[in-house]
Image (spheres, grey):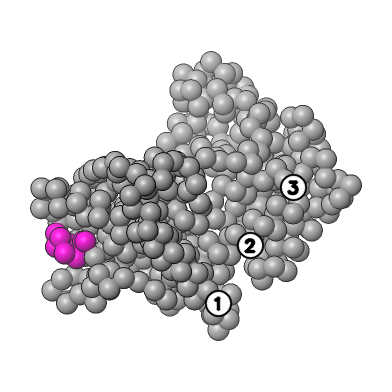
Amino acid sequence: MQGVGGQVLAHVDMDAFYAAVERLDRPQLAGQPIIVGGGKRGVVSAASYEARRFGVRSAMPMYEARARCPQGVFLPPRMERYQQISRRVMEVLAGFSPLLEPVSVDEAFLDLGGTERLWGPPAQAGRAIKQAVGDVTGLTCSVGIAPVRFLAKIASDRDKPDGLTVVADMEAFLATVSLGEVPGVGAKARQRLGEMGLTRLVELRALGPERLERVLGVFGQRLWELAWGRDPSGVTPTREVKSVSNELTLEVDTGDRELLGAHLLGLSQKVARRLRRKGLRGRTVTLKLKHRDHRLATRSATQARPTDAAEEIFAAARELLNAYATPGPFRLIGVGVTGLLAADEGQGDLFGAEASGRRQALGRAEDAIVARFGEAAITRAGHMSASQAPLDRAASKGHNKDKPE
């Protein structure tokens, strides 16, 4: 196995991660179809393999998942818990290589080049990774190992769940890769290429780079390179976080500003916790609203100083909501923070040091409680009104979703 600069890249993908964590915490659900998602109007965040047999897939609307699998166990997402387990997984993987790139809460790339004396050849290293992740978390993962990044990702999906696929002969493996497996090749691209009789990656070699670019634009040039197994991208250990956000799809559309404000408070709490966990603060707060007809509106405000405090994020977001004149109703609300910097960077609060210290102490105490007892263990009274609203206020139990960072 020989990649760019002697690379040996592994892609580790946790199996049906959210659903697996729910089963881990509720052993009585073993063997049952578990579907994690939010409300009737949300989407499926994860489906256990038992649920997938009924055709349930991630990103499917929840109403469709319920129709396909009415006997399923439907559970709301618990992002704090998933992130807690994710941190354990990443700590395990970091023990195998310092060149580790987490790409989401449930997957990561590792560069195993030069580690053969420690972990043995690729197949042996893959088995050691799977064993270590299982020992620490009680969960299974699938591992793909290849000389180039995109093939490692494809390989990890070949033998799910609890699989291990090693690409020893790159040319032979390339011959088996369908266009639907290639990251970035969407339905429209597959349709256009399918109309030309092309369904496998290696078949694109016959078109040449110029024709592929005419058919698919700039991406056609990259596909040409991938068809020959050329992928210069390796593993980037550090990825700059540019934003932290959280959003909620409401179960019932609403224009009730009091109810929307209560949801904003809960979302601001979650954003603040994630900022503190990452050791970050931010200056710009963004409000996101989606109208009933799916029109999207965003409004932003930049603060005098960076913050990781829920009350300050909420105050800015609430002001933006009050200033938004269009009455709604709305189907989604979200809060995000950008303009990030490390918590120990930037100018201190010269005249408000005492109040700032109290906020920080409160934040640390809140984080400790949530880390030990879970996200539901603590909330602000204002947010409780969103989940305990009268029936005519259309209370939401919608889907909380972490946005890509």
Location of residue 137 (image quadrant): bottom right
Image location of residue 18, percent across then percent down:
52, 65
Type of amino acid at the residue the image marks with label 3: Ser
Tell me, yes or no, whether the two marked residues, 3 and 2, touch with CB atoms within 8 Å. Answer: no
- Name the residue tied to disc 3: 97
Q: Nearer the viewer, residue 256 or 354?
A: 354
Res. 145 in view: no
Magenta stretch containing residue 244, yes or no? Answer: no
Residue drawn at the location 72% of the way across and 45% of the way down: 98
Dot placed on the residue nearer the N-terminal end, 3 or 1: 1
**Chain-order first, disc 3 or disc 2:** 2
| Number of other residues with Cα within 10 Å of mark 3, as a class: few under 14, some 14 to 19, many 20 or more | some
Left of 389 or right of it: where is 372? Answer: right
**Relative to 294, residue 70 above or below:** below
Marks 1 and 2, how far apart in space?
15 Å
Rendered location of residue 328, percent (x, y): 13, 53
Residue 371 visible: yes
* Dot 1 and dot 2 residues touching (CB under 8 Å): no
Q: Residue at x 24, y 65 (%)?
A: 262
The residue that disc 1 covers is 25
Query: What percent of the width, then of the height, locates residue 123?
Result: 81, 51
1 to 273, vertically: above or below:
above
Q: Amino acid at mark 2?
A: Arg
Q: Amino acid at mark 1?
A: Asp
Q: 156 or 355, which lies in front?
A: 355
Please tell me which of labels 1 and 2 falls first in the chain: 1
Q: Name the foreground residue: 169 vs 83.
A: 83
Name the residue carrying label 2. Answer: 88
Query: Residue 332 falls in which quadrant of the image?
Result: bottom left
- Look at the image and give the residue range highlighted in magenta: 254-261
Dot 3: element: loop
**Eyeballing the image, is 401 above or below 325?**
below
